[in-house]
Image (spheres, grey):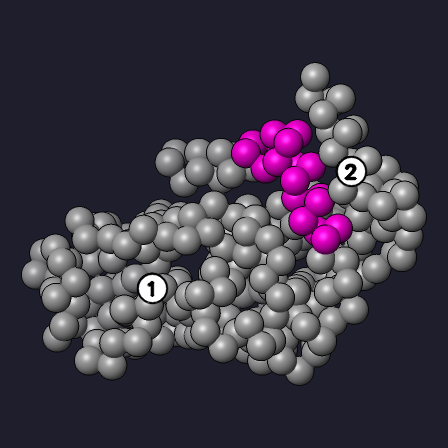
Amino acid sequence: MRVFATAVLMALVFPVSAQQGTETVEALTVTVGANHAPPYRIIEGGEPTGLYVDIFQEIADRLGWKVHYREAPFRRVLRMVQQGEVDVMLEPLEPLETAGRTELMEFVAPAFPPERRLFFYLNAENRIERYADLYGRAIGTLEGASYFSRFDSDDRLLKEPAPRYENLMLMMQKGRVDVVIAPELVGLYTVEELGLDVKVSPFFVPGERSYIAVAKNSPVLKYADDIRAALKLIELEGIHEDLVLKYMDRVAE
């Protein structure tokens, strides 16, 4: 039944001219800008992998695309989008949460699961019970990242940015920040990899789904519907869910 449904969906969502299986006629090489943020995007030391990378690769395979990754800190990736150096970003939050970025990118598909924003701490006095507890504490944040609207726009908070979550956790270990805010999987994965005895505050913020975003100055933008259709296929085939569960299980081990 799943095979039949997949075939029907392919016929509906892919125009005949775009089908070789589900490949596009034009064999593109798509440049993806990504910051190193395990387990979402593992860009260092060999073949890129990670949850977001694997999901996008499944999409690219169905469209007959080759994918090239350029690793850079998050804020620099945004500049690369603006300057036409990359075609795709894998992570931007919903457009409502990223005011101003809609001028640079088309938020094509919510491909990645929502994740809570957690507050990590080492010392008991820095445990966050409520939003008000953040005041007066140095909070480690990823350069250029958005978390949730109240936090992002709150100028009374003392935010200390760094290019990677590994840097932020080590800054906390050295006493340079009191708390680190991070998406759940990234934060838990990072402290496990670093072997730190870090705790999670009871206060958290529900997450939003993250998107595949295409630069508005990129030729890839004309294939936005193809990207959406390929994503629907891997969801229907159960591949999307399998990948999400695989990486969640790794963090839970």
The verdict on residue 232 being magenta is yes
Residue carrying label 1: 148
Considering only vertical position in the picture, is 142 above or below 113? below
Query: Looking at this rendering, what residue extends furthest in the front direction?
Result: 12
Looking at the picture, tell me which residue is in the foreground, 198 or 183.
183
| Residue 186: x %, y % from top left | 41, 53
Q: Amino acid at mark 2?
A: Leu
Residue 158 appears left or right of 28? left
- Disc 1 crowd rating (10 Å Cα; few below 14, some 14-19, many 20+) is some
Mark 2 touches mark 1? (CB < 8 Å): no
Residue carrying label 2: 12
Q: Specify the principal SS of the magenta part.
A: helix
Q: Which mark is residue 40?
A: none
The verdict on residue 138 being magenta is no
| Residue 68: x %, y % from top left | 73, 61
The part of the chain drawn in magenta is: 225-242
Considering only vertical position in the picture, is 185 above or below 160? above
Specify the quadrant that holds the C terminus.
Answer: top left
| Residue 169: x %, y % from top left | 31, 62
Q: Is residue 50 visible?
A: no
- Foreground mark, 2 or 1? 2
Q: Amino acid at mark 1?
A: Phe
Which residue is at a point 41% across and 40% down the rendered structure image? Answer: 251
Query: Looking at this rendering, what residue extends furthest in the top direction?
Result: 1
Where on the picture, by quarter, is residue 102? bottom right
Residue 188 appears left or right of 242? left
Q: Is residue 180 visible?
A: yes
- Identify the element where label 2 is drawn: helix
